Image (tube, helix red, strand yellow):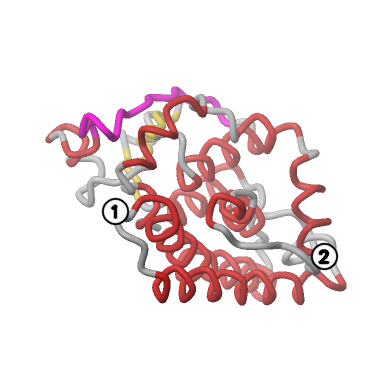
Amino acid sequence: MIDLYTAATPNGYKATIALEEMQLPYNLIQLNLMEGDQKQPEFLKICPNGRIPAIVDRDNDDFAVFESGAILIYLAEKSGLLLPTEAKARSQVLQWLMFQMSGIGPMMGQANVFFRYFPETIQPAIDRYQHESRRLFEVLNGQLAEREFLVDDFSIADIANWAWVRTHEWSGVSMDGLEHLQRWSDVIYQRPACAKGITLPPRAEASAVTKAGESMITR
């Protein structure tokens, strides 16, 4: 059994989507980020960085994993799903996972902060993060021009990127003209496990979480 500590954020949804796709049994523990649950000593023992998501694998000596990308890799290796074992294909999936971790997440997160939550309008900052997010979308669109998913078969790279890309309107980033990216996003949404994963935990908490800007500036 996996204990999943999470909240209604793009990073949190990466874990729930993966668990649903892999059909791994899990216990969802919802943290109230506005109340500072993620900074409590008991959670910091699991995730020293005080961010969600984090997991504890009760079937593996209560092994704890934090950082959403590391969680995706761990779950893929545990289940034997959504991460190729062949060296080149595995490397490609990990490359696109790192693309999200280092680019899509941080850039869209900063776009959210300056576009939605910052107490004053700093247009150069808004423009900088929205434009960079759009550039990264164009990179994804190019990769998807001749393949259904980022690396041929559906993988943890698709989960990680889709969990953020699907929120593009909230970041003020347009997908106009990116037909391959839009097609990919629509296809993934049709997967029952993905559609379910973005409802757990319920979205009702997300407004409180994002007002703090907490989840939007982490990877």
Residue at 27% in and 33% down: 34
Please provide percent x and percent y for residue 216: 40, 52
Judge left or right: residue 31 versus residue 101. left
Above or below for 121 versus 36: below
Q: Residues within 10 Å of mark 1 (few under 14, many from 20)?
A: few
Residue 66, placed above or below residue 95: above
What is the residue that sits farthest to the right in this orientation?
146
* 55 relative to 133, above or below: above
Which comes before the other along the chain, label 2 or label 1?
Answer: 1
How many angstroms separate mark 2 from mark 1 (CA)?
36 Å
Check if residue 132 falls in the magenta segment. no
How many residues crowd around disc 2 within 10 Å: few (fewer than 14), some, or many (20 or more)? many
Q: Is residue 133 above or below residue 52?
A: below
Residue 10 % position (x, y): 50, 46
Q: Nearer the viewer, mark 2 or mark 1?
A: 1
Q: Give the residue type at disc 1.
A: Pro
Q: Nearer the viewer, residue 62 or 161?
A: 161
Element at badge 2? Answer: helix
Q: Position of residue 215 (x, y in %)?
A: 37, 47
Instruction: Find out whether the residues at labels 2 and 1 contact each other: C-beta distance under 8 Å.
Output: no
Residue extent of the magenta highlight: 24-37
The residue labelled by disc 1 is: 119
Residue 87's x, y, as percent? 64, 73
Relative to 158, 69 lies left or right: left
Residue occupying image coordinates x 60% and y 33%: 197
Quadrant in which the C terminus is drawn: bottom left
Secondary structure found at label 1: loop
Amino acid residing under circle 2: His
Q: Quadrant of residue 109?
A: bottom left
Q: Which residue is mark 2?
A: 180
| Residue shown at 49% from the left, 70% from the top | 103
The quadrant where residue 2 appears? top left
